[in-house]
Amino acid sequence: MLDSIYKAAEQAAPEEMCGLIIEKDGNEEFINCENFAENKLNEFKIDPKTFVKYQLIAKIKYVVHSHYMQDCHPSEHDKKNCKVLGIPYLIVSYPDRGVNIYDPR
């Protein structure tokens, strides 16, 4: 699954990529989402309708996004939003292919 996430990060670069890892019927899947943020170079925003759609049909295990030419540690903004959402963030760095999971719980 990480290969798919890194490929999505590569395609979005230099902007941030975003998506979801969902679990449905015992299977995990990466869903690449459009980034609706105004400043896509340093932020991401998943369409609320897309988010709710997947909440209704599956378990959202991770909110995924990329950091281009930065490390994969969560920013203060990431930490705040992740805590409010209550779903762990899986952050990848591109092109160095780092990965970090931030769980506010």
Image (cartoon, rainbow, N blue to C red):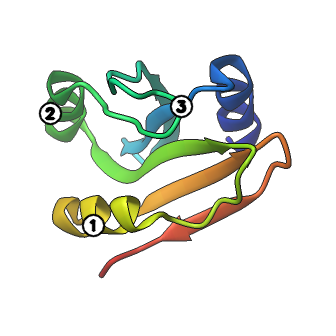
Residue found 22% across the figure and 33% down from its top? 51
Residue found 46% across the figure and 29% down from its top? 31
Look at discs 3 and 1 and give the one toward the viewer.
3
**Quarter-wise, where is residue 56 in the image?**
top left
Labels 2 and 1 touching (C-beta < 8 A): no
Q: Residues within 10 Å of mark 2 (few under 14, many from 20)?
A: few
Q: Residues within 10 Å of mark 3 (few under 14, many from 20)?
A: some
Q: Residue beneath label 2, please?
A: 52
Identify the element where label 1 is drawn: helix
Q: Which mark is residue 41?
A: 3
Which numbered disc, 3 or 1, marks the residue that appears first in the sequence? 3
Identify the element where label 2 is drawn: helix
Look at discs 2 and 1 and give the one toward the viewer.
1
Q: Is residue 58 left or right of residue 91?
A: left
Above or below: residue 3 compared with residue 103: above
Front residue of 105/76: it is 76
- Quick one: which residue is furthest to the bottom in this view? 105
Q: Residue beneath label 1, please?
A: 80
Front residue of 52/44: it is 44
Above or below: residue 10 compared with residue 86: above
Residue found 27% across the figure and 67% down from its top? 80
Kind of residue indicated by mark 2? Val
Look at discs 3 and 2 and give the one toward the viewer.
3
From the top left corner, tell me how far across and down residue 40 is, in percent: 46, 27
Determine the CA span between mark 3 and mark 2.
Answer: 25 Å
**Quarter-wise, where is residue 33 in the image?**
top left
Q: Residues within 10 Å of mark 1 (few under 14, many from 20)?
A: few
Identify the element where label 3 is drawn: loop
- Quick one: which residue is furthest to the right in this view? 96
- Quarter of the image with the N terminus in it: top right
